[in-house]
Image (cartoon, helix red, strand yellow):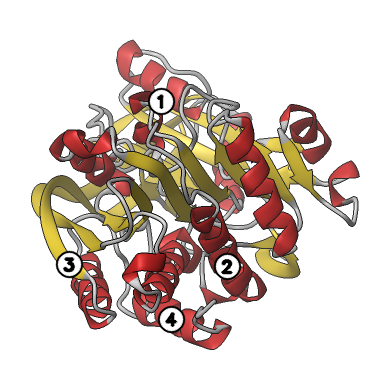
Amino acid sequence: MTVPDTAEIMAWIETITARGIRRPGYPADAWTERWAAGLLADFGLDVRLAPVEVPTWHPVAATLRAHLDADPSRAVEVEAFALPYTTPKATVTAPLTRSAAPGRIAVREHTFAELPQALVREIATAVHDPDGDFDGLVQTLPFAPGYLEDLDGAVTSGAAGYVGALTGIPWETRDYYVPYDAVRRSVPAVWLSAADSRRVLALMDEGPCAGTLSVESETATATSHNVIATLPGRGDGWVIVASHHDAPWASAVEDASGVALVLAAARHWSRVPEEDRPHNLLFLLTAGHMAHAAGTRAFIEENRALLDRVVLQVHLEHAARECRAEGGRLVPTGAPEPRWWFTTRRPELERLVERALVAEDLRRSFVLPPDVFSPMPPTDGAFFHPEGVPLVHFLAAPMYLFDSADTLDKVDEASLVPLTRAAIRIVEGTEGWSPR
């Protein structure tokens, strides 16, 4: 295989992250789509940019000041991070309570979910774990169970504000970029770090408190773009290899690493003669993942005639290192984060993916049904699943996925080439397969 080496793939990731925060509509994201399109064109692919309208959200400032009713001089003031797409600008003063109630500011504690890998192994179609790590490994996921229902409950209850207290997060952060469904919620809402949360809660434990919650952010709409690049191959069938180019922060893993994996696969296939490509190939870098997968949904709507000719849709997301928390910081362990390969329930496809994982020794890997955790896989390409498109979606879910702590040291460099090669093996293995 003519696969770029680790240094070249990592250099692409470094180039992307150096531009800064890549939220939908941000300048760094617009730069990234143009840069990726130029690189794909240099590889010899036919490239176009398809416009996608996305809602934008830009936080400016957020604070919470709490004081005891009985002694207003007993006060705590902390910096906060506004929840995306909640009330963009407001200053409210109201009683602080631990539950949502009309006219109150709800202070709600949250922690991340813990997932024993032995449990995932029981529901997996196949596993590649030769070291037996999954026997005792418990993965911390980047999801606070029930937070969205809790937030929406505050909205429907008529709460004056919402404070998400990240007391159970393993490291010190308030930079939690969720929700990312781009739903505008009519409540001022913020996240607080664990230490700041404990200060506020300790004051509340002393007696009734009032709080002043102040948020300022900017919302608008912008035109982003799906990057679409094609290579002709044999027959009428298509394989789509995709990821997304936007991100919650500068985000090396989410998803500069995915962009780089797609570029690496495209570079390989560009050097394979047309007659040796098993199908026509489409490489897709979508816009607006952080706005409810706007780019994926737009691509599907605009290319419905193509879907019936898709042999396989591959998504590549998150070459991630596992981390542990030390002194309020995240430190990479050197091991990869558990890898999920959401694969359509077709025995020949499941066997093909398993063979690729073993051939490239991609340890800590599960082959999973697409709907094992929810009706759709938790990937940017999820909306291909209800369309009946056969899919293989690679994704890792490190606890820092939506946080500014997603920096270059979190990229699992050792897996960049094996992941690229595995994706190529999977595409090669579909030779002779018909769409659907």
| Residue type at the position of mark 1 | Leu
Q: Secondary structure at mark 2?
A: helix
Marks 3 and 4, how far apart at CA: 23 Å
Query: How many residues crowd mark 3 within 10 Å: few (<14), some (14–19), many (20+)?
Result: many
Residue at 47% in and 69% down? 252
Q: Which residue is mark 2?
A: 421
Evaluate whether residue 174 shows in this view: no
Query: Foreground residue, 148 or 412?
Result: 412
Q: Which residue is mark 1?
A: 151
| Residue type at the position of mark 2 | Arg
User: Are the two marked residues, 3 and 2, in contact with CB atoms closer than 8 angstroms?
Assistant: no
Mark 3 or mark 4: whose residue is earlier in sequence: 4
Marks 1 and 4, how far apart at CA: 35 Å
Query: Foreground residue, 184 or 395?
Result: 395
Marks 2 and 4, how far apart at CA: 21 Å
User: In the shown orientation, is residue 150 left or right of residue 49?
Assistant: right
| Residue type at the position of mark 3 | Val
Percent x, y of residue 109: 58, 33
Marks 1 and 2, how far apart at CA: 42 Å
Percent x, y of residue 189: 35, 36
Q: Which residue is mark 3?
A: 47
Mark 1 or mark 4: whose residue is earlier in sequence: 4
Height in image: 111 above or below 252? above
Mark 3 or mark 1: whose residue is earlier in sequence: 3
Discs 1/4, front: 4
Mark 3 or mark 2: whose residue is earlier in sequence: 3
